[in-house]
């Protein structure tokens, strides 16, 4: 699939621009434009007019069923074209927008990487692949929102967006795991064919919805999107309106034919979508900043798309796909147009938009066209798709869900018409003052204005040639759901939907035209405040935990580790039952005697107050154990133990000769009885656990293999030696390495201490 | 499984962990030694049954050589660890006339850091980036 090469190209050029071409970002930008065009060509050649959708697989962990699967089906073609064409348009715009801006190289780099990730999301043919690219888009979005890293609010908005969409990404990963385990596949086509149900599938549905809702800013996760407007306008237009926030819609579109039958899915989708539409619409009506107005309107439109795509009616799915295209076109135009005004007049206030009328007539006209399309006025494309949506909901055979969805969509549409009308009034009324001279170069002005005008042109052209566009959109809808066949018309004739539209437009215009252009300013939204509270209290909780556990006391750490280990073993014992005593063998009297002696030495090591004596007692423990080893048929162990124990005593003597005979009295950081209790618990639980472990052994020892191969293959009769130097020779090499490292450490500790002591004694001698 | 070795394991584990929970590095070193011995006995006792030494040609049932190979490695590594702890104790004593492990002050400071100091990091960052 050549499109994958283009995706890779976007990543490569992006990284190269951000890292290598920092001083010449224009080179990277032009290379990026070329890759966008190549991607469009690849999509059209491979994906349009073919019977079978081209697929590709990138092998990764095939044994675990984790490969990246791609398919350029109809919906993939539509979405890739939206992503790549708009990417091309927005990038040309950005070249002028970022003139003389030092962050341009970084912008181009991340922007191209984002475009690559987003293309990956839309052509992914299983949930796992989509998840991988989904996360990449979240990271790119984070970097782009925080592009102006000197602004604290931008950084905060970036963190909010990242944590919200990142949490959704984790949910998606959970869904991937659940579906892979329960259904055995995450391929969208397989899921649609299987129509899985069950408890685990329900859990996966919740996780998928959470992923979609966080990404597409649905209630109650709608708060991060307006905050993301801290990013430069090209970013807002591209990521946070036309493409990335549609990833949630793409996910719903791909999974809705599989899960849409479940009533639980329908209710969730419809309620979240409708609430989001209303909240977004209401907020959009009260914004002073034109960009924020557009952001809230995006939230509202995403709500509509969620309802259409997720409700589970094939015709609504078709309408959703159409409206997705309509929204991408008009919203990009609006964002970029407002960006031009901002760039030229240095204001985005709704009440001052009219000043652009004389200076930027073409841009203003385009903004008006796009706004009319957003409001759903004939003959623009927004009208066509919204009519289709109303028809689809009126015809949907889904009972109460469809009724509620219809009511929500009508109310939301009233608000959309209202905020559009308010924006329209702001654009066309007589300006309070005439704008000052412009400062952008002629080429720059053309670059800035061109995509805005084009977007407006397409909003009109798609509307006028609605039936043709409708035919083109059949393939994308069909690739999602085999029943999702529909058509678009500009003039549907007078029917219920048209009457509803008329009422919506009249009521909406009335509200919007009367709404004040300067609204009372509202601070951070409740969603943002709630998010910040959760964020702060999480950090505070982590700090309290750290304060409680990170005391800086080594004995405390040892004690906690011991208690946790004991508790873990104890829980294992309680779950599996204490071991029976049946497996005990009779010990020889000699074994019992020596073991008793060693135990006495060990206890004495703890209680004697003298250093040398304690060290010698430790030696006694070691020698006693060597005797036990001999009696168990382990002469090699006994030999090693004897040597090591002797060396240990020598080293103890060397180290202790500078210290006083007696130990200093132990500090009472924790009462002695508590330490003794912990130690006793360990002493009881560990042997029980060892017994349990031995009893639960199922596989035979590998010893038989070693015993048979030892003489033939290694030429040695002493199997323990053969294991050490031959079968497991590398382990022995590791052991020697540890010994060497410890020796280096000891040498250095001693040398440094000697030098310091000499310096100190020399200092005191003077 | 040998009952007396099992009990011995328990005693060694208890004594070793008691010593590890001390502040005196000498006693911690003793704890490392005792606990290491406990682990070795545990592996041998739980991993194999008493029988003839695993040398080909001996008469009778041979015991499992694998736990022995593991323990042989463990004995040597335990010795390395013990030497290192003793070197630490010696160094502490030589420099400070004291072989006790003090509390880690940095660990305590981390918990005292409040949001105001976090904010100052933020401000410093802003000073760094602004020209």
Image (cartoon, coloured by chain):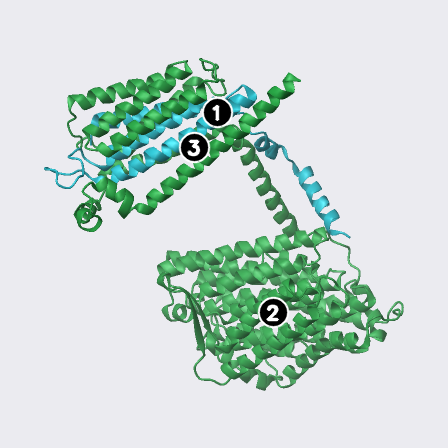
Reading the image, the residue beneath label 1 is B89
Compared to residue A415, the image places residue A222 above or below, namely above
Reading the image, the residue beneath label 3 is A561
Neighbour tally class for label 2: few under 14, some 14-19, many 20 plus, Cα within 10 Å: many
Front position among marks 1 and 2: 1
Q: Is residue A340 left or right of residue A248?
A: right
Image location (x, y in percent) of residue A560: 45, 30
Q: Secondary structure at mark 1?
A: helix
Front position among marks 3 and 1: 1
Neighbour tally class for label 3: few under 14, some 14-19, many 20 plus, Cα within 10 Å: few
Compared to residue B20, the image places residue B74 above or below, namely below
Pick the front one: A487 or A748: A748
Query: Which chain identifier belongs to the green chain?
Result: A
Q: Is residue A346 visible?
A: yes
Q: Secondary structure at mark 2?
A: helix
Q: Are marks 2 and 3 on the same chain?
A: yes
Q: Is residue A713 left or right of residue A519?
A: left
Compared to residue B60, the image places residue A430 above or below, namely below
Image location (x, y in percent) of residue A589: 16, 21
* Residue in view at x 25 percent, y 30 percent: A638
Asked which quadrant contains residue B57, the reply is: top left
Query: Which chain identifier belongs to the cyan chain?
Result: B
Alpha carbon distance from label 3 to label 1: 22 Å
Alpha carbon distance from label 1 to label 2: 57 Å
**Callouts 3 and 1 close, C-beta under 8 Å:** no
Q: Are marks 3 and 1 on the same chain?
A: no
Asked which quadrant contains residue A600, the reply is: top left
Image location (x, y in percent) of residue A310: 51, 67
Reading the image, the residue beneath label 2 is A13
**Callouts 1 and 2 close, C-beta under 8 Å:** no
Image location (x, y in percent) of residue A125: 45, 70
Alpha carbon distance from label 2 to label 3: 50 Å
């Amino acid at each position: 699939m050549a499109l994958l090469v283009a995706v890779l190209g976007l990543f490569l050029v992006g990284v190269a621009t951000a890292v290598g071409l920092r001083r010449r970002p224009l080179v990277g930008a032009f290379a990026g434009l070329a890759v966008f065009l190549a991607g469009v060509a690849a999509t059209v050649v491979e994906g349009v007019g073919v019977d079978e959708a081209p697929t590709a697989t990138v092998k990764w962990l095939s044994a675990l069923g984790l490969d990246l699967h791609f398919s350029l089906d109809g919906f993939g073609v539509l979405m890739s074209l939206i992503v790549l064409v708009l990417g091309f348009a927005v990038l040309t715009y950005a070249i002028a927008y970022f003139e003389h801006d030092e962050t341009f190289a970084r912008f181009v780099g991340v922007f191209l990487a984002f475009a690559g990730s987003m293309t990956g999301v839309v052509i992914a043919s299983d949930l796992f692949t989509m998840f991988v690219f989904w996360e990449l888009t979240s990271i790119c979005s984070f970097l782009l929102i925080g592009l102006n890293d000197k602004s604290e609010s931008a950084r905060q908005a970036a963190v909010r967006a990242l944590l919200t969409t990142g949490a959704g990404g984790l949910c998606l990963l959970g869904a991937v795991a659940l579906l892979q385990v329960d259904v055995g596949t995450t391929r969208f086509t397989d899921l649609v064919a299987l129509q899985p149900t069950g408890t685990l599938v329900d859990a996966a549905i919740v996780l998928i919805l959470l992923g979609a809702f966080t990404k597409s800013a649905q209630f109650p996760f709608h708060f991060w999107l307006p905050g993301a407007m801290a990013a430069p306008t090209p970013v807002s237009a591209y990521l946070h309106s036309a493409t990335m926030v549609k990833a949630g819609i793409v996910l719903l579109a791909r999974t809705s034919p599989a899960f849409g039958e479940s009533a639980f899915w329908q209710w969730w989708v419809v309620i979240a979508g409708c609430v989001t539409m209303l909240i977004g619409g209401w907020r959009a009506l009260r914004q002073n900043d034109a960009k924020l107005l557009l952001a809230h309107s995006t939230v509202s439109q995403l709500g509509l798309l969620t309802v259409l795509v997720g409700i589970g009616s094939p015709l609504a799915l078709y309408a959703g796909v159409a409206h997705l295209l309509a929204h991408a076109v008009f919203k990009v135009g609006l964002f970029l147009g407002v960006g031009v005004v901002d760039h030229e007049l240095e204001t985005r206030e709704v009440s001052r938009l009219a000043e652009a009328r004389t200076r930027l007539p073409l841009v203003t006209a385009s903004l008006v066209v796009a706004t009319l399309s957003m409001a759903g006025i004939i003959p623009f494309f927004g009208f066509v798709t919204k009519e289709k949506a109303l028809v689809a909901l009126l015809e949907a055979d889904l009972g109460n869900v469809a009724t509620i969805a219809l009511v929500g969509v009508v109310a939301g549409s009233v608000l959309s018409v209202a905020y559009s009308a308010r924006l329209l009034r702001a654009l066309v009324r007589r300006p309070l003052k005439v704008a000052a001279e412009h400062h952008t170069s002629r080429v720059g002005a053309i670059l800035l204005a061109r995509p805005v005008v084009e977007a407006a042109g397409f909003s009109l052209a798609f509307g006028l040639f609605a039936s043709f566009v409708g035919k083109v959109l059949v393939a994308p809808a069909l690739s999602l759901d085999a029943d999702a066949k529909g058509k678009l018309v500009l003039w549907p004739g007078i029917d219920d939907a048209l009457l509803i539209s008329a009422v919506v437009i009249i009521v909406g215009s009335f509200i919007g035209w009367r709404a004040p252009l300067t609204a009372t300013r509202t601070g951070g939204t409740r969603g943002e405040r709630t998010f910040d509270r959760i964020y702060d209290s999480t950090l505070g909780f982590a700090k309290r935990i750290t304060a409680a556990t990170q005391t800086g006391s080594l004995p405390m750490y040892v004690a906690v580790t011991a208690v946790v280990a004991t508790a873990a073993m104890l829980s294992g014992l309680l779950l599996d039952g204490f071991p029976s005593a049946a497996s005990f063998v009779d010990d020889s009297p000699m074994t019992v005697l020596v073991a008793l002696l060693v135990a006495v030495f060990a206890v004495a090591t703890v209680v004697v107050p003298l250093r040398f004596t304690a060290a010698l007692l430790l030696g006694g423990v070691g020698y006693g154990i060597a005797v036990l080893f001999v009696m168990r048929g382990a002469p090699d162990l006994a030999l090693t133990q004897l040597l090591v124990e002797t060396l240990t005593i020598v080293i103890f003597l060397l180290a202790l000769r500078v210290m006083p005979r007696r130990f200093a009295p132990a500090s009472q950081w924790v009462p002695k009885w508590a330490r003794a209790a912990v130690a006793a618990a360990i002493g009881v639980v560990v042997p029980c656990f060892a017994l349990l472990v031995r009893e639960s052994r199922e596989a035979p020892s590998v010893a038989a293999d070693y015993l048979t191969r030892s003489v033939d293959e290694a030429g040695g009769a002493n199997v323990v030696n053969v294991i050490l130097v031959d079968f497991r020779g590398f382990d022995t090499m590791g052991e020697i390495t540890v010994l060497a490292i410890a020796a280096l450490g000891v040498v250095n500790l001693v040398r440094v201490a000697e030098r310091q002591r000499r310096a100190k004694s020399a200092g005191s001698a003077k | 499984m040998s009952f007396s070795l099992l009990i011995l394991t328990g005693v060694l584990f208890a004594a070793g962990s008691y010593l590890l929970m001390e502040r005196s590095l000498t006693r911690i070193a003793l704890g490392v030694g005792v606990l290491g011995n406990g682990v070795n006995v545990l592996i041998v006792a739980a991993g194999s049954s008493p029988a003839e030494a695993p040398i080909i040609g001996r008469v009778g049932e041979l015991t499992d050589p694998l736990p022995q190979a593991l323990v042989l490695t463990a004995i040597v590594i335990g010795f390395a660890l013990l030497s290192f702890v003793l070197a630490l104790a010696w160094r502490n004593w030589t420099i400070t006339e004291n072989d006790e492990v003090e509390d880690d002050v940095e660990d305590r400071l981390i918990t005292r850091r409040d949001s105001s100091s976090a904010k100052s990091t933020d401000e410093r960052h802003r000073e760094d980036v602004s020209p």
